[in-house]
Amino acid sequence: MKMRKLFPLLFLGFFFVFFMLIAGSSSSTTHTASEEGQNLPEVVLRWKDKVTKEATKNEIPEAVPYLLGIIMAESGGNSEKYPDIMQCSESQGKQPNSIQDPNESIEVGVKYFADMWKGHRDYDVLNIVQAYNFGGGFLSNSGKSYSLDNAIQFSKTQAGGKTITYTNPIAVSLGYDYRYAYGNMFYAQIVKQYITSTSNNNSQGNAAIVKAALKELDEGTHEGGTKYWQWYGFNGRVEWCAIFVSYNAEKVGVKMERFAYCPTGIENFKAKNQWLEGGNLPKSGNIIFFDWDGDSISDHVGIVEKVENEVVYTLEGNSGDMIAKQNYKKNSPYIMGYGTP
């Protein structure tokens, strides 16, 4: 649905970063981050099969990109130097780095993450990521929507206001040269950069966003879209079709900027040569844009569920102010085109 563009999208540029990340209250790990827009390094990706196996066993296969991001943040995947590659010994009440088998670390770390994820299905996944660092108690204070301010306040309270110097580039880009001396209040932001840099521009990523949207549909109509526009950061109701798309893409790590205004989404896809004109057959997981009144300005957006016999089946937020399934013929005059993340 049409709405004015309320604020510009912010994004980090390309850079290499070297940093010390404190995971929890005492353990630390040094490693080199990958360049944004490129895949995670092989030293992390070598654990993908094990992570996928454990995530599937714990019924959170959609969390794999986040779990790999956590490994990157915690140890850089360097099991030779850091056998507890998910730095999860403390989640079992043990001393830091007590786990000496990387496979055991993944088993314990994924289960710990899964227990929090499954207990807070309607929470922003970045809150779960932050809780991996702070501990599950954070989720009692975070609210459902992720907020860096909430993470900062929680860390400040737990640290009694004590600060330490911290020059991680992510923190610096957010205007900080310190953090509070409890966990890492920037942890979700640090992991998020690796979600962005993990390429999901493939059938697996497409399938994940469809699965996520179907799950939202199955869990209820979410009439009025409150869950979604609050997640995006709005204080009152806005037209939420684009926000629904952004929510599901970010939840499963699909590489796509958030957008709340349909024309902005089109601009983003065209700028990356990820645009397919209407009249063509899209693929499952593509983002479908509509123009109801023929003025060449997109009014509405959804997710392509599947394509059968030249009919495009969709999942749409804010369709009658609810989540709904719809379908259109390939040559429908209302279809402007598709974003192809």
Image: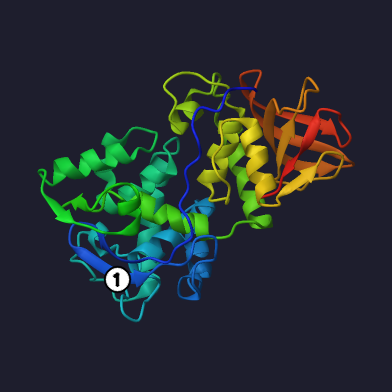
Q: Which residue is mark 1?
A: 30
Above or below residue 227? Residue 213 is below
Above or below residue 244? Residue 20 is below
Relative placement, left or right, of 138 versus 267 is left
Decide: few, some or many residues near mark 1? Use Cα within 10 Å; few <14, some 14-19, many ≥20.
Answer: some
Residue 19 lies, in percent from the top left, at 31, 66
Residue 85 lies, in percent from the top left, at 35, 70
Name the residue located 67 percent from the left edge and 58 percent from the top edge: 202
Q: Secondary structure at mark 1?
A: strand
Locate the N terminus by quadrant. top right
Type of amino acid at the residue the image marks with label 1: Thr
Above or below residue 35? Residue 144 is above
Residue 56 visible to an observer of this rendering:
no
Given residues 81 and 289, the one toward you in this image is 289
Number of numbered discs: 1
Given residues 231 and 1, the one toward you in this image is 1
Relative placement, left or right, of 33 versus 304 is left
Residue 126 visible to an observer of this rendering:
yes
Name the residue located 72 percent from the left edge and 34 percent from the top edge: 289
Given residues 146 and 128, the one toward you in this image is 146
The colour scheme applied to this rendered structure is rainbow
Name the residue located 17 percent from the left edge and 43 percent from the top edge: 156
Residue 199 found in image quarter: bottom right
Name the residue located 86 percent from the left edge and 30 percent from the top edge: 332
Given residues 4 and 312, the one toward you in this image is 4
